[in-house]
Amino acid sequence: MAFKGTLREFKVPDILQLVSLQKKSGILTFNSQEGFITLIFEDGFIVGIDAFPKKLEMRVGNVFVKQEIISEEMLQRALAIQKRTNQKVGEILIGMGLIDEKTIPEVLRIQATQIVLSLFNWKKGEYNFKVMDYIDKELRLLTPIAVDNLIMEGVQMLDEWPLIKKVIPSENIVFEPVFLGSKKIALISEYDDEMQSKDSNTLYMTETEVNLLKHVNGRNTVQDIVELGLFTEYKIYKNLYNLFNKGLMKKKEKTEIQEIQEKKAFEDLEQDNASKLNRLSRAILALLVLTLLLTFFAPLRPFHSKNMLRKTSLYRSCLPLTPPAR
């Protein structure tokens, strides 16, 4: 079985569920102005994935750089080796002794999940599924990912995103931790929300919230935390939203110096734009004047001393009757 169509006919969750329920193996591609994404299925599970222009291996490499496991120079060296040997970047970094082999699968899973979830925001595009009897080992990049969990997370993301964006409207917002005083912290499961009201002197936090709070320091922007690759973008935004509502962090107020710097930067930008506009206006004016001059005087220029047209009666009839005064 092979099928294709547009995202106006079938939405991403419907397509994923169809392949999963029928336990198909093959290659599912999505193509739109957003980019190009390929999913490798084996028996209804996602076992491989890639994307363009943000390729999976580049995403994984950037995560290691952001987490300061490797440097940007080391990543570029690994990418250079990949071009020559066609090895996977992860394998190269492991071979160079820069990362532990155990860290690769989890980072791959998070970035792969992020790629799939990004599909849920696509409104237009085309899809194409090609059935394959056998999936080559080189295409199996991931520990098999169940599609049902991805669909649930994707649908939940679409429902909750507008609410989250009211608290975190920009990726450039900086949060800072709030002093807890004498309150205690107790760990709860990700889905246990009833504990929140049992004890007013205890703050109940999930493990995800605890891990994220370590990076809320008054310096990191939301995008900085996302780029660490600890969780998917949606999960990070959702848990930051929860931390804010629990009073464990607040938006960092801009200092007077920051406001002055931003105001000056804005004024400099306005001044620069005005300067460019003035230069452009002067250039246009000069071009206009030159055009007018050429329009009035250029017609006589072909009639130089060696031009035979000067000897015609038509040219002589155009000459003034009396020579101009000196």
Image (tube, helix red, strand yellow):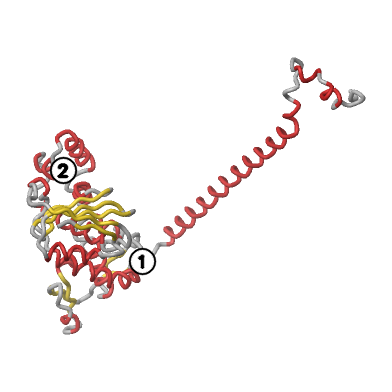
Residue at the spot x=27%, y=72% of the render?
A: 159
Placement of the N terminus among the 4 image quadrants: bottom left
- Specify the farthest residue to the bottom: 198
As drawn, the label of residue 89 is: 2
Question: Disc 1 residue type?
Answer: Pro
Mark sitting earlier along the chain (1/2): 2
Percent across and percent down for residue 50 are: 20, 50
Q: Is residue 45 above or below residue 278?
A: below
Q: Nearer the viewer, residue 36 or 81?
A: 36
* Amino acid type, residue under disc 2 in the picture: Val
The answer to which image quadrant residue 120 occupies is: bottom left
Residue 180 locus on image (x, y percent):
23, 73
| Res 193 quadrant in image | bottom left
Depth check, mark 1 against mark 2: the one in front is: 2
List the residue tagged with mark 1.
Answer: 169
Residue closest to the eye, 192 or 116: 116
Residue 44 image-quadrant placement:
bottom left
Report whether 39 appears left or right of 120: left
Real-space Cα distance between discs 1 and 2?
Answer: 34 Å
In terms of secondary structure, where does tag 2 sit?
A: helix
Residue drawn at point x = 26 percent, y = 49 percent: 52
